[in-house]
Amino acid sequence: MFDRVIFKNQAGYGPLIDIGALAEALLFYGHVSIVGNTGTLRYLLGKIPPLIFLQLIRSKRITFYYTVDSVAIQTNTREGHLPLHGLITYSSPQHTIERTPSDIFYELSNDKFAARRFSKAVQSIDHGLFDQTAVIETFCNHDLTENAVTAVVTSLTPNYSQQDKIRFRVERESKGFVIDTNIDFELLNQEYHLFVPKKHSSLTPAYLLSLFQTTHEDLYFAGQLDSEVAVSELGRQVQQVTVGSLLGNRFQSESQIEAFESLTLESCYTIREAINSGKVSFSEIVKLLDKADKFRDWLHDQPPDVEIINRYYQATVENTWVEKLPSKSVRWGIFTTAGLGIDLMGAGGLGTAAGIGLSAVDTFVLDKIIGGWKPHHFVEGNLKPLLKNDNSNEKD
């Protein structure tokens, strides 16, 4: 857990890459990989200053893998028959790893030397071992596919309804496969386009299946790079229905991060929220990365099944005289006086957070109490002040 994570283009409508989640991952994970194409590069370098992004790659905090090919679902209409679909892999001669990364970087930075360095640092990845046959096998599992389609339709178009239960069956033919469904796609898209522009996408049988193909692609890259995979909310729903058990580590990590931020960042923005709202610039997060090294090392050393919140508490007081105090209320008094704001462990586990920030004097006193480096040093001393909510000190 918190070793390596992959970001790739998100499924469905929205930003290609969640920049706030990327910043969060840089603070929590040992290494971040990004798998993407021309569009991914242009989006990232439009959101993150190109020289900052190059710095992250050269310092080996990020690896960018440029996809030299893509997978898709091809549809051929046939008069008097259901459309015939097939899974394909294709590439574009206009978008190559030799030219595209350098061209986009130079366009957005106007720095030829940096563009050459960036191009040399980008790595290639392909779908050469991607098993399209296994994808079709999954499609042909009627119960699985219908459950997944129902979940996606409910998520994307919550007001869409039909009298009969959704039918969505994939049947093989000699040159591909057909889709037998009772979904009214005209009515479905009327609802869908209330939230998603027509120029972005329309819902079709092939588009729904492409979301499931993307799920298999996520697993493929996770295996290739031995990493967890960050996904959008829509991608998460598809994965939970289809192959959720195989992505349990990532879901657990996300839950751990959310719980950890809820406890330690009381009265603050979360990392993701701070970046995506513009409250904090990506560059400011990058400035914290060196100071976060010990924190990431500590996270990496935790067993994969441990609750990070409990371990954070233990790491803060273990081997100190505070740990030996007999009364929970006395220990709590020590910590609220110092301003740490963490409720202590009782018989029932972790309680609530007080959410009190540390002053310079408080930090000095607390360091004297517990001694040595502790994970709270980074959270309270570096991260929390950066993410402070402007209204956090207002009185009711």
Image (tube, rainbow, N blue to C red):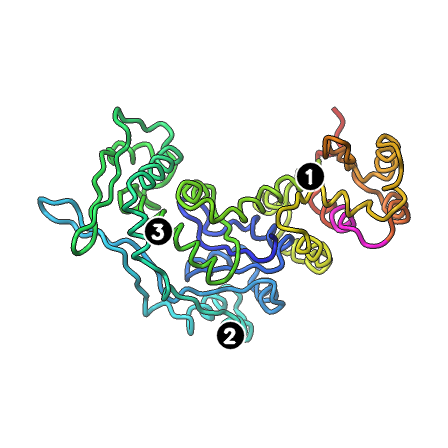
> What is the spatial separation of the Cα atoms under label 1 and label 3, in whole angstroms?
38 Å
**Of the numbered discs in the image, which one, if any, rests on residue 213?**
3
The quadrant the C terminus occupies is top right
Q: CA distance from mark 2 to mark 1?
A: 39 Å
| Residue count near mark 2 (Cα–Cα under 10 Å), binned few <14, some 14–19, many ≥20 | few
* Residue beneath the point at 89% across and 48% down: 364
Q: Position of residue 38 (x, y in %)?
A: 41, 62
Relative image position of residue 351 (x, y in whole percent):
73, 32
* Foreground disc of the pair 1, 3: 3
- Which of the two residues, 246 or 165, is positioned nearer the viewer here? 246
Query: In the image, what residue type sits under mark 3?
Result: Gln
Amino acid tagged 2: Lys
Residues 321 and 288: in front is 321
Q: Is residue 236 above or below residue 124?
A: above
User: Percent from the top left, x then y, of residue 390?
Assistant: 70, 37
Dot 1 amino acid type: Cys
Q: Earlier in the sequence, mark 2 or mark 1?
A: 2
Residues under numbered marks 2 and 1 in contact, where contact means CB atoms less than 8 Å apart: no
Residue 185 position, x and y percent, is 25, 36
- The residue wearing badge 2 is 120
Which residue is painted at 68% across and 58% down in the image? Answer: 289
Residue to which mark 1 is pinned: 268
Question: What element does badge 1 sit on?
Answer: loop
Residue at point 38%, 70% (across, down): 96
Question: What segment is highlighted magenta in the picture?
Answer: 372-381
Q: What is the number of callouts on the image? A: 3
Q: Main secondary structure of the magenta part?
A: helix
Q: Earlier in the sequence, mark 3 or mark 2?
A: 2
- Is 43 left or right of 92, judged from the image as shown? right
Which residue appears at 46% of the width and 66% of the height?
104
Q: In screen coordinates, is 53 left or right of 40? A: right
